[in-house]
Image (spheres, rainbow, N blue to C red):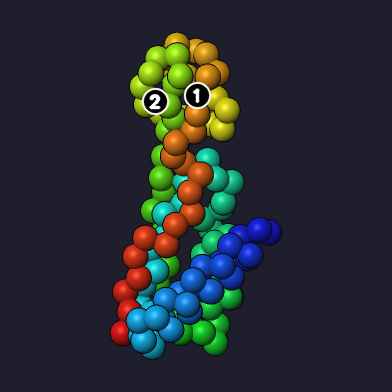
Amino acid sequence: MHEMALCEGVVGLIEDEAARQAFRRVRTVVLEIGVLGHVAPEAMEFCFEAVSRGTLAEGAKLVIERVPGAGWCLDCEKTVPLAERFGACPECGRHHVQMTAGDELRVRELEVE
């Protein structure tokens, strides 16, 4: 379950930011998770609860916002939606698509005290 390691990284980022900005508690964490990133939101919720115990993020609400897949078709020269990694362009059917969104994992927002 790689979500455990991902959550450990998120909590580490939060703790680093707390040291820089001197906040003492996190109320809400908003994560952006790409739909093509092979990260299960349910597993992230479970792991975040476990990993955040005993930290300043313990008890924080975890909000997960899914980011749709997108890519740049080198043949069509436009941004197209992607439903799978390395998928064909839905416009021309060719596989000359460079993924531009959908595999991110980002802490977008923190609500802190």
Q: Is residue 105 left or right of residue 109?
A: right
Residue 102: % across, % down: 46, 41
Q: Residue at x 63, y 65 (%)?
A: 4
- The kind of residue tagged 1 is Val
- Residue at position x 51%, y 68% from top? 10
Badge 2: few (under 14), some or many (20 or more) residues near its Cα, within 10 Å? many
Please give the label number shown on residue 97: 1
Q: Are marks 1 and 2 in contact (CB under 8 Å)?
A: yes
105 w.r.t. 21: above or below: above
Say above or below: 99 vs 51.
Answer: above
Viewer can see residue 46: no
Q: Residues within 10 Å of mark 1 (few under 14, many from 20)?
A: many
Q: Which residue is mark 2?
A: 80
Could you say where residue 95 lies in the image, as x and y percent from the top left?
Answer: 55, 18
Q: Report the side of 61 relative to 113 (left or right).
A: right
Q: Nearer the viewer, mark 1 or mark 2?
A: 1
Residue shown at 50% from the left, 29% from the top: 98
What is the three-letter code of the residue carrying label 2? Val
Q: Say which quarter of the image contains residue 53.
A: bottom right
First in residue order: circle 1 vs circle 2: 2
Q: Secondary structure at mark 1?
A: strand
